Amino acid sequence: MDLSRSAAAALDAADPLAPFRDRFVVADDDRLYLDGNSLGRLPRETPAALARVAEEQWGRGLVGSWSSWIGRATEIGDLLAAGVLGARAGEVMVSDSTSVDLYKLLVAGADARPGRDVLVCCADDFPTDRYLVAGVARARGMEVREVEAHIDEGLDLDVLAGALDERVAVVVLSAVAYRSGALPDLAAVTRLVHDAGALVLWDLSHAAGAVPVELEAIGADLAVGCTYKYLNGGPGAPAFLYVRRELQADLRQPIWGWFGQADQFAMGPAYDPAPGIERFAVGTPPVLAMAAVEVGARLVAEAGIERLAAKGRALTDLVVALADEWLVPHGVALASPRDAGRRGSHVSLAHPQAWQLTQALVDRGVVPDFRTPDRVRLGPAPLYTRFVDVWDALDRFRAVLVEGAHEACPTERSRVT
Ligand SMILES: Cc1ncc(COP(=O)(O)O)c(C=O)c1O
């Protein structure tokens, strides 16, 4: 690979997704935003979309606007289903937070497998996933099997297979590992779990908008994910949940709220869940926040998930190649799968002083994030990150190491990055 800056500029010139960068607010071109990926950038359209809901619908329409708001969660869910998740209409809705949706689907899934008393999760998964599995297991008197996964390479299917038997009700896994970016074979994992008679619940937070997940094609049962990363829905944006159509009638979620009720405004005496995906709703949805999710979902759908994934692989390949050349000689190690087909759109780099390096990078206008125990995570989001941004960021990373600038940064973890 040609590692010159002009080669990176040539990749930008040939990039069919390059025009999408102008659809986002980039307040400072010199601030290289490679946060990986806790918060996507603000789409230019979003403030106007929020203002429309606030001024026209809320301000003028007042409570009468509920007639158009009431179906928004499933309408935006359908957009995500078709444009981002490879799911069918009526299988996705926007709702609550990722953690709350995970709880709802985990309990619903466990209830759907009576007589099975084990929940499986990955020991290296995102904390909220592990905590929720532990909490649900404790409340139900179930056992947790935590499958060990390689911190950099992700889940080994043979190890997962060893944890599956007729006692397992639900397996919770991330499609893209939050730290390393490792991407397992989603179809193969789903088959393995089904062979054991269990349900699989995917956390798509780091996958949605970055890699094709093809939920219908792989026969996925259940999934949740956030919309503030690659979907650019904004801070605190509501999450989405997916339930395969064929399972919906049999699943009941544990939070019996009136938005999940069949005939909601009849205000009936007893809970009688709606027949479709609406039964997984709980209470009044965040209408303003959903307007921002819709803008983000439309942008991803317009760009096309295959093109986004291809660019994500090319961007992260450049990170890896430049790290090999410039950073590895200074004690940095690749902490993500080397094969682009086995990772999402972020890469982690390990160094004993990763926390100090993260701060030194922020001081030089590069925004990565730190992940325990000793990782600098770089997430070049394909919708708006240029190849020259990656080149410049790695160049600044090299300079920090060469000059030892990180040595002067505090060692205690106090700053949020
Ligand atoms: C993989 C993963 N799962 C779950 C969550 C938690 O989501 P929420 O805070 O929206 O509940 C996050 C948050 O970053 C995440 O990265």
Image (tube, rainbow, N blue to C red):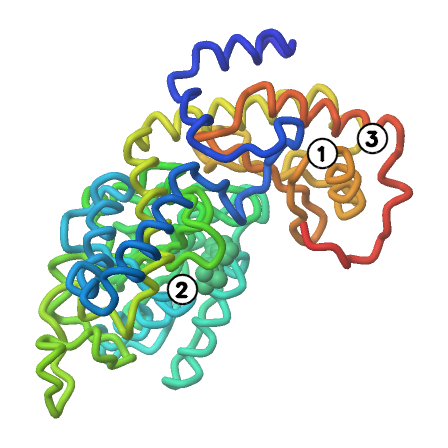
- Asked if the residue at label 2 sits under 8 Å from ligand 1, the reply is yes
Q: Give the image location of residue 195, x and y in percent.
A: 24, 56
Residue 97 numbered tag: 2
Residue 362 in view, yes or no: yes
Q: Nearer the viewer, residue 69 or 293?
A: 69
How far apart in space, not on screen, are marks 2 and 1 (Cα)? 31 Å
Where disc 3 sits, the SS reads: helix
Q: Classify mark 3: residues with Cα within 10 Å, few (<14), some (14-19) or many (20+).
A: some
Q: Give the image location of residue 147, x and y in percent.
A: 48, 60
How far apart in space, not on screen, are marks 1 and 3 (Cα)? 15 Å
* Residue 44 placement: quadrant: top left
Residue position for label 3: 401
Where disc 1 sits, the SS reads: loop
Q: Give the image location of residue 324, x and y in percent.
A: 68, 23
Where disc 2 sits, the SS reads: loop
Whether 27 is drawn above or below 200: the answer is above
Residue 230 shown left or right of residue 331 in the figure: left
Q: Nearer the viewer, residue 337 or 358?
A: 358
Amino acid at dot 1:
Gly
Residue 195 in view, yes or no: no
Residue position for label 1: 365
Q: Residue at x 63, y 31 (%)?
A: 28
Q: Nearer the viewer, residue 246 or 405?
A: 405
